[in-house]
Amino acid sequence: MNIKYLIALALAGLLAMSSIAYAGESLNAYFTVNYITYLNPNGQVNNYYIEYTLSIYNNEPRSIPLNVSMSILPYSSVIYTSPAATAINNNMVTWIITLRPYSEEVLDVRFKPVYTLLPIATLDYGGVLVNGSSVNSTVVNGNVGTNVEIFINTTNQLPFPIVTTITLTRQSGLFYEYNITPTITQDLLGYEVDYWLFNTENVTSMSLNMITENMGPWHSIRINPITVQTSIDLNESIKALNESINSLNSTLNQLVSFSSTVINASSLSSNYTTQFFQLIALLNQTAQVLGASAYLINSTLMVEGLLQAQLVELKVALSTEGGQILGTEVSVISQIRSLLGPIANNQQSYINELNTLKQDLLQIESSTNNATLISEINNAITIINQLEGSLTALTQLYNGLGAVQDELTSTQAQVNQAVNGLNYAIAAANESETLIISISNNLYLLHNELLNLTNQLLATYLSISSYQTRALSYMAQVNNYEEEIRSMIVNDEVEETVLNTLAKQYLSYVSINETNVSTDVTVEETFIINMPSIVNTQYLLQLINATTAQGNETQSPRTIGIVVNGYYGYFLIMGIAVSIMLILILIRKFRY
């Protein structure tokens, strides 16, 4: 039994050691550094201190002993710690605590440095104005209708955005006017609190007016302070920069892919341009040959009509000129079909490549908001559709030329038959005349078709040349976009490096069990602007005179009680005496 008990104790000790050894993996921490400045109504600093707040969360079902240290600035004086620090040595504040399972501990130290730091932003409000004039006191003379105004300007000192929060607790007796509607309004413990939230990249400005409507029984009102806080969550900012860098890299890769696609398409269009130019020249030459052939056949027909007796000469003409012409045409058409063959046979492949290019353009169009780039992409897609139509037309021409080639071969056989028929009868001349007319008409039709096709190819050639010009323009624009994105990536990477450096600097102020605990860092600056109190000095002077007159008379305790109750119980006799002294000081200040 004793052995089992010892084994259980040993296991418990090992578990406790393991909980200490791996405490860093079981904790989450949030470290906030807040630079707090108190300002009086004329913009002078009343008080300044720095506050460190460390929130530690235990995510484990066991207690974790912690030794936490915070390093404050040298030569600083500690104002406050919560909970009470275990030790304060020079510029090191230490707590030794035990964090219970699934619990949170908040450690706080407030200290006053020997110099003022404003690492995030600066506040400029130029002092508080009362009825348009600046004030040099925390108490000013006023009455119902007194207008108190303040202009707040917050300037960001960092190269990346910060969050600015302006807080105002409303109070009765004041009417509020502002140039910007509050972002949030909440009811806290019966008080209405307005919040203004700004994403400050450079400067955030707003103005606030407070007009007295009711001075209360004391004919005075103390205006609540206004709080201006700037902050930056370093971890969230680093995360946002990472996401921005990844997004920019993705966009850059898409642009590079688009550039490659445009280059390939431009190279392909260059090949098409050369082929189209050669084909246009060949078709133009063929059309001229067909026109000359039709003219020659018509000339032969005229000779036959005039000299039907000279059948032998017609036979020679058909055997030599007609046969050579038809042979030439068959040869020319065969050459044209051999040139068109690679295009017609690879039509589907070309169309697939053009469709791929079109899909890439559509994808880029969906990922950009640049109207110029979208317009140019739509023009490129129109040209691609025209190219697909031209490829279809070329394939149809290729098939049509095959039919014409077959027809010319058949016609040549018919000419041979006509020549042989001339050996038998003169009557065959009429049949030969009809055949020659048919050949002539067919040659003229083919001549016109080739001219139309030449014009179509010429238009396509011009479109391809225009596309190449636009492609070069696109490439220049895309290259500019790529350079801009690369510049943005470099800027974001520099900002990320600066933020990481700041985070490491602030994390060096905290030590938790001398381990690397996952800690988020937030840096804040809080400016608390004390507003003036509005006091109706004339009323208080009358109150002083009345009180003095009553003091000169012999009053019974009962009479004094009646006087006190006449003022609704708002002050005691000692309070009246102190108030009289303060008011006399104020009256002297206002008079002199």
Image (spheres, rainbow, N blue to C red):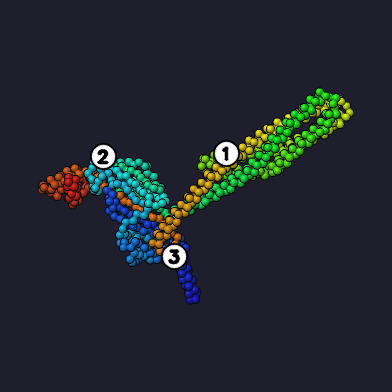
- Helix, strand or loop at label 3? It is loop
Q: Is residue 522 above or below residue 148?
A: below
Residue extending furthest bottom?
A: 2
- Which of 151/358 is in front? 358
User: Which of pointers 1 and 2 indicates the residue nearer the eye?
Assistant: 1
x and y, in percent, of residue 194 in the image: 35, 45
Report, in whole angstroms, how far the alpha carbon at label 3 lies from the one at label 2.
Answer: 61 Å
Q: Which mark is residue 145?
A: 2
Q: Which circle, 3 or 2, is nearer the viewer?
A: 3
Q: Give the mark, 1 or 2, whose residue is nearer the N terminus.
A: 2
Residue 204 in sight here: yes
Residue 461, percent from left and from top: 63, 38
CA neighbours of label 1 inside 10 A, class few (<14), some (14 to 19), many (20+): some
The residue to which callout 3 is attached is 515
Q: How crowded is the residue under tag 3: few (<14 C-alpha within 10 Å), some, or many (20+)?
A: few
Q: How many discs appear? A: 3
Find numbered disc 1 in the image and state the secondary structure of the residue it sits on. Answer: helix
- Residue at disc 2, secondary structure: loop
What residue sits 33% from the left and 63% below the top? Answer: 74
Can residue 97 be seen here? The reply is no
Amino acid under disc 3: Thr
Please report the residue visible at 45 percent of the width from the left and 63 percent of the height from the top: 516
Residue matched to label 1: 379
